[in-house]
Structure formats: structure tokens, C-alpha cells
Image (spheres, rainbow, N blue to C red):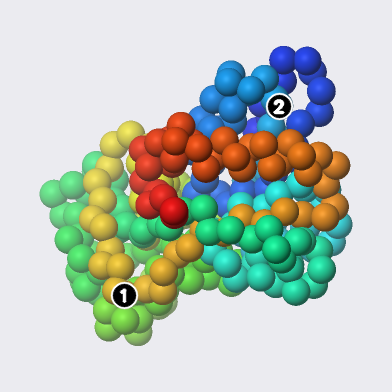
């Protein structure tokens, strides 16, 4: 499931096309609007699980840049020669949280260990096979000692947004998702997962060779790294890289 969001430019010219991890959707939509307002340039975003986007890029999809949820897929694309290794940058760091809907507020888990209790019948995470946040969630459950007790209760979303939707709709009793995803919806409650339980999530960008507007992609990156861009990312729950 990939979602596209286009921002119009003042002169109607085609701007850069950027692939971005699903947990960036709300933040990047705001970044795109502000970039357009301040610089008059169109940006088209396609959001999805990092692994699925990387597969598309590897197969020749015409993206100008890729903003992944970690460095795994950007490194693989650089090694394959599909993207420019010298352009790779960590643009933010992220955290995962344990989210539950308001319907379960009275019985919400306080820590990952609580998920071992039988009352949590279904637990949603993004698919660890292609979503870095799914891998981080699984790693945290393993390190906290509860994975063996909850493994058969897991339900997997194609990306973090779908994992959260499972918990919002009642198809899961809890979800482990990025803080940015939890902040993008109203209602519900969350507990931040101890960062020592999973490998650091260093969100990494890289320039792609198959796009048609490398200059536009660099201008968007410049805005993202500006004080205005950093403020937007911080407000959406990201830790900004220097």
C-alpha cells in the first residue's frame, strides 16, 4: 500500500518526486506545503514501507530521492549503484511507542511486558520483513522477554500507518508504532518504549539516479535541514540530527 501526495508549484512545473517512509507522511505533507509556500516549488511524495519503496527504486522507479526509516535500504541501493552513496545523510532519529485506543484507556499497557497478559489478544506492528519499525518492535519485544509469549498474537500491517489502523479499528488491542505516527492521530494513548530495547532508528536519505529533478530534490533537502524544516520535524516527534 503506497500513498501519493502532490504539492503544486507556482509555475506549474514538475518538481521532484520523493519516496518516503510511511511514518513521515504527516510531517512531510507539512514540509511540502511550507516548501511550496516559501519557495514556490512542487514536491510529489510517495509514502510506503521503506522496503517496498526500495524495491521499486531498485526496479527503476523514477524517484529523485529516498527518505527511508533507517539506513538498511539506502545502503543496499547505494551498493547496487541505483542511488548515490556519497549523498546519504541521517536526517532524523526516531522512537517507537506502545499505542492503545481510548476504548482501552482503563486497561492500557504501561510497558511491553504487559502485552504478555491474555487480555491483549492481538498486537499490531508493521511487517518486519520490509518495515524498519516492525523490526524495531520485534527486537524490543524479544529484548524485553515477551516475544515467545506474544508471537502467535501478532498481526502485521504493510506499514506503520496500517498497523496503527488495526489498533484504532479494534482489530488489534495495541500497536507498536513510531512516535511520529502516534502523534499524527487524535485520541488514544501511548507509552514511549525504552530506547535500549532496540537498535537506533537513524532515518536516512539518499539521492536516486533514476529521477528527473535532482536539483529540486536538493532544494527540498535544504529546506528540510533548515531551521524551519527542523522545527516541523521536531513537532512531529523526530529527534533532529546535526
Secondary element under disc 2, as helix, strand or loop, is: loop
| Number of numbered labels in the structure image | 2
Can residue 201 be seen at all in this image of the molecule? Answer: yes
The x and y percentages for residue 219 are: 67, 37
For residue 144, above or below residue 163: below
Front residue of this view, candidates 73 and 187: 73
Q: Residue at x 85, y 42 (%)?
A: 212
Is residue 207 rendered to the left or right of residue 221?
right
Q: Residues within 10 Å of mark 2 (few under 14, many from 20)?
A: many
Secondary element under disc 1, as helix, strand or loop, is: helix
Is residue 57 rendered to the left or right of residue 172?
right
Q: Residue at x 41, y 57 (%)?
A: 94
Front residue of this view, candidates 77 and 23: 77
For residue 172, above or below residue 7: below
Q: Which mark is residue 42?
A: 2
The x and y percentages for residue 157 are: 52, 58
Is residue 144 rendered to the left or right of residue 155?
left
Amino acid at each position: 500500500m503506497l500513498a501519493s501526495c502532490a504539492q503544486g508549484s507556482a509555475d506549474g512545473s514538475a518538481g521532484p518526486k520523493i519516496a518516503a517512509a510511511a511514518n513521515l507522511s504527516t510531517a512531510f505533507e507539512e514540509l511540502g506545503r511550507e516548501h511550496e509556500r516559501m519557495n514556490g516549488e512542487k514536491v510529489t511524495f510517495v509514502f510506503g514501507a521503506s522496503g517496498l519503496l526500495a524495491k521499486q527504486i531498485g526496479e527503476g522507479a523514477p524517484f529523485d530521492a529516498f527518505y527511508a526509516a533507517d539506513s538498511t535500504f539506502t545502503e543496499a541501493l547505494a551498493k547496487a549503484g541505483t542511488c548515490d552513496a556519497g549523498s546519504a545523510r541521517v536526517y532524523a532519529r526516531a522512537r517507537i511507542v506502545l499505542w492503545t485506543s481510548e476504548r482501552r484507556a482503563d486497561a492500557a499497557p504501561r510497558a511491553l511486558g504487559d502485552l504478555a497478559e491474555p487480555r491483549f489478544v492481538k498486537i499490531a506492528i508493521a511487517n518486519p520483513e520490509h518495515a524498519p519499525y516492525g523490526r524495531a518492535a520485534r527486537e524490543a519485544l524479544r529484548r524485553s522477554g515477551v516475544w515467545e509469549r506474544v508471537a502467535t498474537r501478532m498481526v502485521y500491517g504493510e506499514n506503520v500507518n496500517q498497523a496503527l489502523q488495526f489498533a484504532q479499528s479494534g482489530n488489534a488491542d495495541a500497536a507498536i508504532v513510531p512516535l511520529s505516527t502516534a502523534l499524527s492521530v487524535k485520541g488514544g494513548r501511548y507509552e514511549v518504549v525504552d530506547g535500549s530495547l532496540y537498535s537506533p532508528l537513524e532515518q536516512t536519505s539518499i539521492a536516486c539516479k533514476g529521477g528527473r529533478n535532482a536539483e529540486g530534490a536538493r532544494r527540498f533537502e535544504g529546506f528540510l535541514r533548515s531551521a524551519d524544516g527542523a522545527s516541523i520535524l521536531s513537532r512531529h516527534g523526530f529527534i533532529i540530527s546535526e
